[in-house]
Image: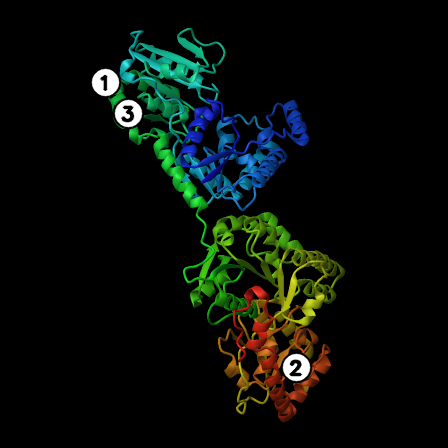
Amino acid sequence: MRIGVVSGWDVNDPAAWSGVVQPIMRELQSLGEVVLIDPQDPGVSILDRAAAKLSGAFGKTYLVRHALSTSLRRSSAVANELRRLARTEDRLDVIVAIAASTDILRLPESIPVIQITDASFASMQTSYFQNGDIAAISAVQGRLVDKLSSRRTDSYVVASQWSKEALINDAGVIPDTITVAPFGPGISPSRSKGDAKNEHGEDLKALVVARDWRRKGVPDVIAAVEQARKSRKISLTLVGDAPPELPASVRHLGTLSSEGLSAEYLPHDLLIEFTRGSGGGVVVTDALAHGLPVLATRIGGLETVLGQSGWLLDLDDDLIANAAEFLVQLSQAELASASEDIQTKLSSHPNWDSWRESMAAGLDSATAREAPVARDGKLKAVMITPMIPSTNGRESAGETLVFDIASAISERYDLTMLSAFGPANERSLARGTRGRNVLVRRKESAVLQLLGKMIGWRPGLAPKDLAKLRTHIAAATVIDIQWQEQAALIPWLRRINPAAPITVTLHDVLSQRFIRQAKEAKDALTSLVWKIRARLTQASEYLVMKWADHVIVLSEKDRDLLPRVAQGAEVSIVPPLIRGELLDRREKIAHRVTFVGFMARWANEEAMYWFADEVLPLVRRELPDIEVVVAGGGLRDDFVDRMDAAGIELLGFRENLDDLYRETAIVIVPLRTGAGVKYKTIEALVRGVPVVSTTVGSEGIPGDNWFWGVTDNAPEFAKLVVSGIRASQEAELRAAKAAAEASQTFGFASFRRGLPAPYQPTEVPNNE
């Protein structure tokens, strides 16, 4: 295994990250070939240098290393170095980021990333900057960079349970992607504790080690020891950073080498660690490795690291008094027993052997790739779709189209459908689906919500969701995308799997729908909003044609609406597959008119409002006993009330429509907005039911003579309904002839012939 390493620390510095970087490197080298990704430092961005100076002028700290501009700058340098290495060396299997969350934002998606860390930015801010020293703009950026980093991370190895909970709560990391593996000691003992003697004769020898005396609570340690000194003999040694004006009783040694610090651990009786924040607890781990019991504050990861090998006190206003009382009552026998217990249980304390085992499991999991060939010998495919189709009782034409394309793909490939949990998918799963479905739970960001409102649509999956689905996407031979909205994911899909051809199915051309909405708007402002949405959507259609390898549309009309792009996607016209046959309609109800559609769609609601208000009163003048019914789910209360007032019967969702079509004299399609080929129009045609439609309802259907009539004029629409009922025999004969032609145009063979090359089976059936 080739392991690329990115580190925010100098890997050659023995003291880096409290001395754990070099042991981490050593353990990684035992697990594979380690390649250090160490580009030239790009430095701090001009923007962040200015912000740091401005913050400093107001007495605030601006963390340039965690600022967005500098993080992107550093991440770009790492990504460029990675690309340079890829041209000259074998491919890396995984990237391990050692305390380098700010350096991985722009790494290619094709390589899994494991972060080794001990805290989230928010927890670090709380622990290290308790007095509000950090500038607000710096804090906001630090949290943002943390979240962006988490989206590019496949899994985490963290030092404590506290670290895990911080990532979950602060950065929204999925719990299952985090492994808790406490660090081993940064300093190993050069001799056993039993060899060290208490040379000063004190009753109790305490030690405190501090790189930052404020964060380590050194003043509280000194105060507690001074208070306890009134009742027993205690000495205190301070190694590292010290506050000004130390009491004469404190022995201050300054910064020591690893060997020097090890020599100080051994003769002491107790390490005191009153830290305000600690994710990894490396000093505590070092003390335990030397057999030294620990008195610490109950904070951060210390509870995980310390276990039963010491004592914890609450970090509150009573800390000094409680600590002093504890030090007074702590006996040499208790210390000796604790030290002996530590040394007999060394293997259960945090150590590098157990850390290496956890890291090995993490590497195996991150690099585990699904085989490109399934057990049955089929190549693998994935479909990105906001809707998982059920095997029966499908609610909409869109769900049916997804089902038919998925069925065609499944004949040649082992298909996995990737989607998100939501009401429609949960209903579909309850009805029953087939094949492999992988759904993620997602919370749409405020940015995506705003974008959705601005442009009138939003994808079912977001780029950050793809990280959870990477193994499926990377193993796919072909990638299918359903609906235009999902095509925005193509750049991210290419980063995960640059080789697989991508096919996008446009259920309709959205820009046409939005242009029609603009024309139908009742005021200038609403019309302007729809025009802007149409322009933005046209730009997205250009990108679809530029990015995708294949595009599926349902009609020549939709193909002609798409922009022409040099060397763009190959467009395939795939007529909808409409199931059904000519029905025996001798028992039809003479004056029944029917509309079929999923009523949660505004275009369908608006169509029936227009029919009820503008057309139906004219029909009732000629045919007072006319009966109008609507079949379809997704009924809103306002729509129900208006239809009740108009005397229109609502049947709700009907799984099998054949009985309804047998009883219907005329099917109406009064659509005035929307786009694409209307499944329900064709379903009525192939069953031999006379159809009266608007031009929107009939578009994409080649035979105008298949309809009893097509018009957008309300009085003309009413006349066609009346004449279709009165001239019933003639209407039936025309509809029966249309049914034979429609069945050929929208049958199985036509559907299969239209599919793009990657979806064609080895043999295309000639029969219907």
Residue located beneath label 3 in the image: 342
For discs 3 and 2, the disc positioned in front in the rendered view:
3
Give residue 713's quadrant in the image.
bottom right
Q: CA distance from mark 1 to mark 2?
A: 97 Å
Is residue 562 in view?
yes
Position of the N terminus by quadrant: top left
Residue located beneath label 1 in the image: 333
Is residue 707 in view?
no
Other residues around mark 1 within 10 Å, as few (<14) / some (14–19) / many (≥20):
few
Residue beneath the point at 51% across and 48% down: 467
Residue 181 location (% of width, % of height): 39, 35
N-terminal-most mark, 1 or 2: 1
The amino acid pointed to by label 3 is Ile
Residue 16 location (% of width, % of height): 48, 24
The amino acid pointed to by label 2 is Val
Question: Height in image: 92 above or below 185?
Answer: below
Give residue 132's quadrant in the image.
top right
Residue 438 location (% of width, % of height): 46, 57
N-terminal-most mark, 1 or 3: 1
